[in-house]
Image (tube, helix red, strand yellow):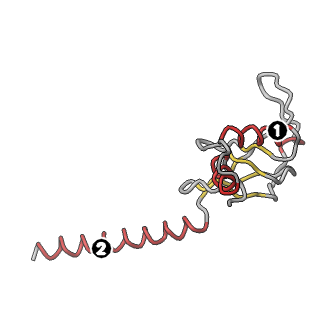
Amino acid sequence: MTSHPTASDLYEVVRMQLPRISLGTVYRNLDQLVEAGEVRRLHTTGRETRFDGDIKKHDHVRCLRCGSVADVHHTPFDFTNAGIHDSNGFEIHGYNLEFTGLCPQCQHVQSEQDSIHSIETKNTKINRGKGRQ
């Protein structure tokens, strides 16, 4: 289980113990946990909603390749205390900050793909050069 599961992730785990449970029941229970302040709902860009059992204020980083989410506990700036006033007259009560990047596993995959691409490019140049001789 990931540290920031989706309702579908939780459903698959719970279904092993309770085969007749519905996804709707999982969503309803998650909604109740969110309302009770026991779980945070994460709205990550372009992805299924995730949930976080760590309700202390912290931010998140999302992998652009695989979509995994991790906690960021040391955000360099707290926007809630910055005296930010929206140009539309909003009183700011909070914020959601999502960093994006590549997780360690996807960095490794990217590095391997870059190496393969580099070798293929060199081979193509060498093969083109042989045809001119």
Question: In the image, 115: left or right of 31?
Answer: left
Three-letter code for the amino acid on which mark 2 is drawn: Lys
Q: How many marks?
A: 2
Image quadrant where one finds the N terminus: bottom right
Secondary structure beneath dot 1 equals helix
Residue 93 or residue 66, whichever sits in front:
66
Lower sequence index among marks 2 and 1: 1
Pick out the residue farthest to the top: 89
Residue 122 - label = 2
Toward which corner of the image does residue 26 lie, by quadrant?
top right
Label 1 Cα neighbours within 10 Å, binned few <14 / some 14-19 / many ≥20 = few
Residue sitting at x 17%, y 74%: 129
Image quadrant where one finds the C terminus: bottom left
Residue sitting at x 77%, y 51%: 52
Query: Relative to 56, does residue 85 appear above or below in the rendering?
Result: above
Toward which corner of the image does residue 29 lie, by quadrant?
top right
Three-letter code for the amino acid on which mark 1 is drawn: Gln
Residue sitting at x 75%, y 57%: 71
Q: Where is residue 64 in the image (x, y as percent from the top left)?
A: 56, 53
Label 2 Cα neighbours within 10 Å, binned few <14 / some 14-19 / many ≥20 = few
Q: Mark 1 points at which residue?
A: 32
